[in-house]
Image: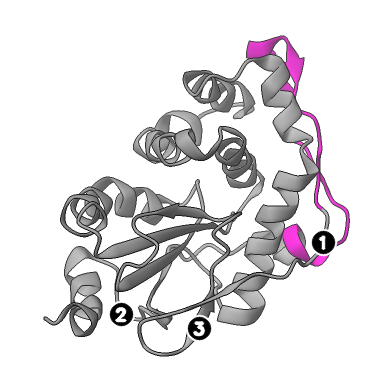
Amino acid sequence: MADSKTPQSGGLSRRNVIGLSLGALAAAGGGLANFVLISNAHAQTAAKSGDGGTMEVDAKTENIMGEPNAPVTIIEYSSMTCSHCATHHRVTMPALKEKYIKTGKIRYVLREFPLDTLAFAASALARCAGPEKYFPFVTALYKQQDKWAQGPGSPAPRLFKMAKQAGFNEDSFNACMRNKEVISHIEKSMEIGRSKYSVSSTPTLFVNGKKLEKGNSLADIEKAMAPYLGG
């Protein structure tokens, strides 16, 4: 099931420049710098999907697990503060990894589609953590979503506490909040998802270019994959 929440007024990708502040970062003795979102579309390399169509995947800039030539490509549009996304990553992803990703049957692409400013910040940190730490950090954020995404006051100290587990300090954290290249990648992911693939909520999954409309449980995904795996 996709989260019923949608991006804040479309503002994260509809304006050329947006200040995105999460308030004082008391735990780090500093503050979160404002995000600057730059609307700048970049060309992506189209990869053929298993159904004979195409769904653009850029191996150089996207977040990918699995073999490049796997018979199934799953693309997930996800928001770090989405409770349904957290459930998907806690409940479904472990089985997908063991049964299909590690065995070379699935190439899994995670695309950012933040529903709010906090999700945007978390997505940026995951990218700034680097390719080796990206998926472990995303997994940790989803497993502990209730600890950093919820609670009284500014969420910034809680997010910084999570970031320290991935090796961030105050300087690298704040540098990430100002990283225009990272911000541009996330904004581009949102815009392409919304305009090209009609993504409006999260999680939204595509199996070899075909959107899962009725659910994203393990059984739903396996049913959608079956024609490409000989099942």
User: In the figure, is residue 90 to the left or right of 33?
Assistant: left
What's the magenta region? 12-37
Q: Nearer the viewer, residue 47 or 86?
A: 47
Count of numbered badges drawn on the protein: 3
Please indicate, yes or no, whether residue 162 appears anywhere in the rendered image.
yes
Q: Circle 1 sits on which residue?
A: 39
* Residue drawn where x is 72% and y is 17% of the image: 171
Mark 3 closeness class: few <14, some 14–19, many ≥20 residues within 10 Å: few
Q: Which residue is label 2 attached to? A: 214
Q: Secondary structure at mark 3?
A: strand
- Quarter of the image where one finds residue 186: bottom right
Q: CA distance from mark 3 to mark 2?
A: 22 Å
Rendered image: mark on residue 54: 3
Q: Position of residue 84 (x, y in %)?
A: 37, 56
Disc nearer the start of the sequence (3/1): 1
Q: Does 86 sit above or below residue 165?
A: below
Where's the C terminus, which quadrant?
A: bottom left
Residue 65: numbered disc: none
**Category of crowding for the residue at label 1, using alpha-carbon neighbours closer than 10 angstroms: few (below 14), some (14–19), many (at least 20):** some
- The amino acid type, in three-letter code, at marker 1 is Ser
Q: Residue at x 29, y 68 (%)?
A: 216
Q: Secondary structure at mark 2?
A: loop
Marks 1 and 2, how far apart at CA:
32 Å
Give the mark nearer the N terminus: 1 vs 2.
Answer: 1
Residue 209 percent across, percent down from the top left: 43, 80
State how far apart marks 3 and 1 are (Cα): 24 Å
Closest to the observer: 76 or 217? 76
| Residue at disc 1, secondary structure | loop
Q: Position of residue 133 (x, y in %)?
A: 46, 33
The answer to the question of whether label 3 and label 2 lie on touching residues, with beta carbons closer than 8 A, is no
Verify whether residue 151 appears in magenta: no
